[in-house]
Image (cartoon, grey):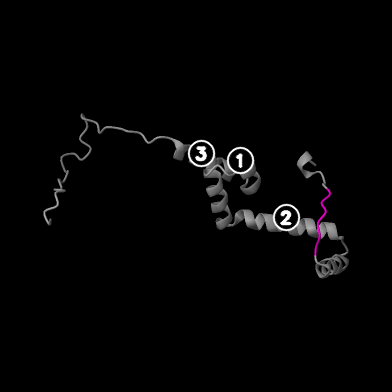
């Protein structure tokens, strides 16, 4: 068990009927409330993290500097977070200003010239 897997006590309030239903299900499965809650939270987080809408929201907030990289990693996983970091760095770079090469005929003499003058005015 890694340090991130160490149990942490969490206290929250819930409507009574939900706790009663949770306890009934726990009894049915011969387990306890905590195990059911942990599993439900795990499944919810996995579903949410895989959602395209969620990933777009994370990306937008990361690109707008509203989320730190480590938070992004926790939300969408290391691989997706790394991809977002590379894309963000690419977006922040100034575009290359490259002149067309003078010594290479990229169209091999098959270029078509288009008159861009607006004759309809």
Q: Residues within 10 Å of mark 2 (few under 14, many from 20)?
A: few
- Residue furthest to the front: 121
Which residue is at a point 85% across and 65% down the rendered structure image? 26
Q: Residue 1's image quarter?
A: top right
- Residue furthest to the left: 119
- The numbered mark, 3 or 1, whose residue comes first in the sequence reads 1
Tags 3 and 1 touching, CB below 8 Å: no
Q: Secondary structure at mark 1?
A: loop
Tags 3 and 2 touching, CB below 8 Å: no
Q: Position of residue 40 (x, y in %)?
A: 75, 59
- 98 part of magenta stretch: no
Which residue is at a point 62% across and 53% down the rendered structure image? 49
- The numbered mark, 3 or 2, whose residue comes first in the sequence reads 2
Q: Position of residue 61 (x, y in %)?
A: 56, 47
Q: Residues within 10 Å of mark 3 (few under 14, many from 20)?
A: few
Q: Circle 1 sits on which residue?
A: 68
Q: Circle 3 sits on which residue?
A: 86
Magenta highlight range: 9-14
Q: Main secondary structure of the magenta part?
A: loop
- Residue furthest to the top: 103
Q: Is label 2 or label 1 in front?
A: 1
Q: Is residue 61 left or right of residue 42?
A: left
Q: Position of residue 107 (x, y in %)?
A: 20, 40
- In the picture, the disc for residue 42 is 2
- Camera-side residue: 109 or 92? 92
The vertical placement of 60 against 35, above or below, is: above
């Amino acid at each position: 068990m890694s340090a991130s897997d160490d149990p942490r006590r969490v206290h929250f309030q819930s409507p009574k009927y939900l706790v009663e239903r949770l306890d009934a299900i726990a009894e049915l499965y011969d387990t306890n409330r905590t195990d059911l809650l942990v599993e439900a939270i795990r499944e919810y987080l996995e579903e949410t993290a895989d959602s395209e809408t969620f990933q777009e929201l994370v990306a937008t907030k990361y690109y707008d500097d509203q989320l730190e990289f480590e938070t992004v990693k926790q939300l969408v996983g290391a691989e997706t977070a790394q991809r977002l970091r590379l894309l963000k760095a690419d977006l922040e770079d100034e575009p290359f200003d490259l002149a067309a090469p003078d010594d290479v005929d990229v169209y091999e003499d098959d270029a078509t010239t288009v008159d861009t003058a607006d004759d309809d005015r």
